[in-house]
Image (cartoon, coloured by chain):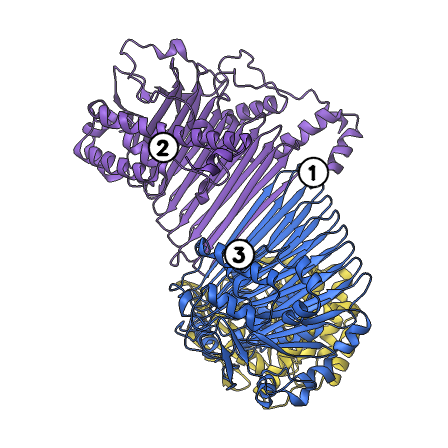
Amino acid sequence: MLSIRNLKVSIKGKEILKGINLEVKAGEVHAIMGPNGTGKSTLAYVIAGREGYEVTEGEIIFKGRNILDLSAEERACEGLFLGFQYPVEIPGVSITNFLRTAINEQRKYKGLDPVPAVEFLAKMEEKKQLLELQEKLASRSVNEGFSGGEKKKNEIFQMAMLEPSLAILDETDSGLDIDALRIVATGVNKLRRPDNATIVITHYQRLLEYIIPDVVHVLFDGRIVKSGGKELALLLEEKGYEWIRSES
Amino acid sequence: MEKNQNNILEEVTTSDYKYGFHTNIEMDLAAVGLSEDTVRFISAKKNEPDWLLEFRLSAYHHWLTLTEPNWAHIHHPAIKYQDIIYYAAPKRKKELTSLDEVDPELLDTFKKLGISLEEQKKLSGVAVDAVIDSVSVKTTFTDTLSKYGVIFCSFSDAVQNHPDLVKQYMGSVVPSNDNFFAALNSAVFSDGSFCYIPKGVRCPVELSTYFRINAANTGQFERTLIVADEGAYVSYMEGCTAPMRDENQLHAAIVEIVAMKDAEVKYSTVQNWYPGNKKGEGGIYNFVTKRGICKGSHSKISWTQVETGSAITWKYPSVVLMGDNSIGEFYSVAVTNNFQQADTGSKMIHLGKNTKSTIISKGISAGQSNNSYRGLVKVIKRAENARNFSQCDSLLLGDKCGAHTYPYIKAENHTSIIEHEATTSKISDDQLFYCKQRGISSESAIGLIVNGYAKEVLMHLPMEFAVEAQKLLAISLEGSVG
Amino acid sequence: MDQKRILISGKQKQNLIMEASIVSTIYDLKEYLSGVFADKQQEITRNDTHFVAAKRAKAFELFSKMGFPHAALEKWRGTDLSRALNHEYHALPEAPSPELDIDKIFKCDVPHFETLLVTQLNGWYADRNNLLQVYPNGMIIGSLAAAFSKYPDLVSAHYGNYADDNSEGLTALNTAMSQDGIFIYIPDNVTVEQNIQTVNITDFKQNLFLNTRNLVILGENSHLRLVQCDDSINHDVTFINSVTEVKIGRNSTLDHYKMQNKDDHTTLINSMYFHQDEGSTLSTNAISLNGGLIRNLSHVTMSGSHSSAEVYGLYLMDRYQHVDNQVFINHAAPDCESRELFKGVLDDHASGVFNGHIKVHRDAQRTNAFQTNKNILLSDKASIDTKPFLEIYADDVKCSHGATIGQLDAEALFYIRSRGISEANAKILLMYAFAADVINKISIPELRQRMDDMVKKRLRGELSQCEQCVLNCSTHEHSHVEFNIDLSKI
């Protein structure tokens, strides 16, 4: 599904990622953990194709194709989804209108006709229930005036609607109370399929109690310094990041 | 990234004016230029009573003493007032009693505009008073309206059939000496619409007029008068498109609204006159005086406008809040692209007690255009507990355009509360990236965000108009907004 | 004489005469000043170099063309000078004698407020025995007139380069007729530890029309705190037309305060022209507590990138006082930031004008510019006229402005009263809270404390023009002013 080889990335001449290697196969859930400022969000943005990052070395192979030359929207249409840590507000644009535009553009990319309105609305209904979303949420503007929890739920809702092959969830657990965390995690679990994959980026082990990862990576100072099974997360929780610091 | 955006903006500027065509209709023209004779010619042509000729002549003589205002943030070559033809009417083949008798070429013109009378009649239940150039050629739904006692006709017909009403209210809101362009209009106005809603009547249909500038080198001087008597309600829609022209055309209209006690008038405009080409050549000069007066207590006047056209827009739909507890509203979206210039906004003059006003203005500038909001909120000593809220936002697309905000706020009453807010920004990179990450192209993302930005205003348009307005936003910014 | 003229009514006639008299008086003052300029050339240009003399001549031409500002000018719409101009003035006060002991007529003793005091008498640099003082760190303070010939290079590099003679008639008049003012030069890499306080005292036996001109130059990487006060000793009619040009060099910082507490007979036109180089920081705060007619112009040009400007103002006016704050922020370079906050309370027949204009040039990308103006009207005779303008030609900007006009929050008022505080005190408390936003921007703790006290006294009606000095020198009360409100009840 995703294969990152020796990825080096700089921002304004300062090297943030110093040679990342990562293999994610279909059906897997990977967790990337690490202290603040080690390059977790940078990695997510670079995979999603945000401008302003200079890839100095390496490649990102997604579904067998190097995607570094693709624009952000092309990567999205290829099936890549990023759940944002801080979802931006888009005033006046309803979630319904936003998602219909997104789905239809993605369909256009694949040479499909726009989704019929009835079908679209039925899907909205189905996914809303999946995530225990309030009825009126869909008519509200994208993220405008949302609480932290609502924003994160909305991200997962969009993921459910867009059905990506690979979803990267950047600190989706931050700012969530325990109920919201459960709903978000349940949503992610229900959407797991043998043909898709998820990368969960998180600071705390807490989320991983709900979303059980196949592989846990520790990102430190721009490198993946440790990989292991889900027990690695527990070890981290117990010993703290200082342990990694001393180890590396 | 930037490059990408520039490409899109370039595409935006390449969308050609869809309504640029010209209908060949035999015209009945006045001599070129403006003189007392021209004024007399127009008045005679329209078989007007003496008092109206006097009105025109006094406006003309006053106009001679005035100079063009120069305070707006607009630039244009001097207008040659003596090179303009001040009267043009399509020659009638015979008296028209039904749609079938309307000049087929005219009907065809409407069809190209997507506003054919038949369609309008069938689908939307909207009474259309279609104005081509200066003379109204067809009024529909008159029968339905007359049942309620609503008068909706061309201004000329009103002069002939309801002279007392016209005489009573014409010039009572915008005096003939109000400003340079108002004086010019008062001297040479050719036709327009007249609307009277009697006491206690809620007008059952949305009233609508389509304006069109057709004849070459013909100035258009519309005059609209809407009177809502006590407790009456009317929603009036004005939509404009004009065919492509190489030379600039002057348009100086007047709209007057009178709302008596407990009356409400909702006036909506979608303006899409020819904005000129990508080089800034041609296009309509739109110098309009629109003003309403809330004469009685608890009356309300609401202006909603979507302005995407004209090379130059100079208009400030205003409300004089005279009656106690009266309400004035102004909702505006103004889009400028290429070399368009807009200097537009509103005036809210609070004279009565407990009067309230709201101004929501959304400016969108692209290309090398300049888009200015200019407004006045004035509260006089007597206007106790007056309230105003103004929000004037500007959105910039591209680094060669300008967005300006010039609010004037004067308060003389210590019980009034006035709030003004304004922001200027571009679409944020965060918003664009967010949309793109969901698979939405930059082009669509800009359209989506712009429409969202304007939503607060668009939602005040009548349903029939909102769709057209969204289309116009699309046409003015690019092909894919929506 | 034709028939019609004779038939005009008595009232019309009176109006005509009144209009005629105002017009002719304005004409007279301009004529008078023109006469002075021509007749007293020698006196006016006594200290001039060729460079300065040429500026004068050109500025006088401009003033002759423009004349005094009038209501038809956009920037003068809310401020009517005709009454102030309707007096006979004396325009060229003599320089003080070398025997003058300025301490005898003026003392500033704000508690704990250590300043390097620079005094002016009727515009002239007061210490006539030592016109230019050079300090060990290279700082120069003294008379501008003396600096003309002593430091011609500094003068020609800056003098008249920032002030706008072309569109402000009064600035042109100042350039043409000013005789002296304060000259301050801070060389590169100097942090001035002391606060510098300039005090312009007017003491004149006749009505005085005073043109005073200051020039402040900060080199690179320098820091200066400057407090400017305007005070009067006698109470004759005074028209002060003050122009200050300030150059803030690369990476330098200026912290500037303008304290105004003038009597009701005074017209104070205070025009500040700031010019900022790359990486510089300006903070300027104008506090107007009293004054017949005050007009503050803060004209800030950011010509170098990564500069920041904070422009603040507070005005508390009553009786028939009038205050006009004009702010023009000229964003001419990218990556700069400006913040404006102006707040005012107007009582009785007082009137106020705020005209904030932010201009962002095409190349000034990534500009952040924010402006706020808030007003409270306390009486039904008070009025405010606010015009927050934005003129923007760059797209990558964040700009905003907000203006409000209102009253004290009725709910808050009720809340405070419900705690047993009298309505009068509750009002003062809320007004003080309103004003405190601006006072809290003062970064010199002693000055902030002093202004805090002054504002409290002003709001309680205890501060009047008879306290001769802005910073309170004549009162002997050095303890802090406290509200007679029991705050524990809130």
Marks 1 and 3, the one that precedes in the sequence: 3
> Does any portion of residue A120 appear in the rendered image?
no
Q: Which residue is mark 1?
A: B415
Dots 1, 2 in contact, CB < 8 A: no
> Chain C rendered in what hue?
purple
Give the alpha-carbon distance from disc 1 to disc 2, as whole Å.
37 Å
Closer to viewer: mark 1 or mark 3: 3
Note the chain letter of the blue one: B
| Inter-mark Cα distance, 2 to 3 | 50 Å
Whether residue C164 sits left or right of residue B283 in the image: it is left
Residue C346 appears at what percent x and percent y? 60, 32
Residue A204, image x, y percentages: 65, 61
> At x 57% / y 89%, what residue is drawn?
B105
Chain holding disc 1: B
Residue tagged by mark 2?
Answer: C243
Name the chain under label 3. B
Location of residue B130 by image quarter: bottom right
Residue B362 in percent (x, y) is at 58, 61
Q: CA distance from mark 1 to mark 3?
A: 41 Å
Badge 2 amino acid: Val
- Name the residue tied to disc 3: B58
Q: Nearer the viewer, mark 1 or mark 2?
A: 1
Q: How crowded is the residue under tag 1: few (<14 C-alpha within 10 Å), some, or many (20+)? A: many
Colour displayed for chain A in the image of the structure? yellow
Identify residue type, mark 3.
Answer: Ser
Identify which residue is drawn at 42% across, 28% down.
Answer: C85
Q: Is residue B450 above or below residue A111?
A: above
Which amino acid type is shown beneath numbered disc 1?
A: Thr
User: For residue B316, what is the image quadrant?
Assistant: bottom right
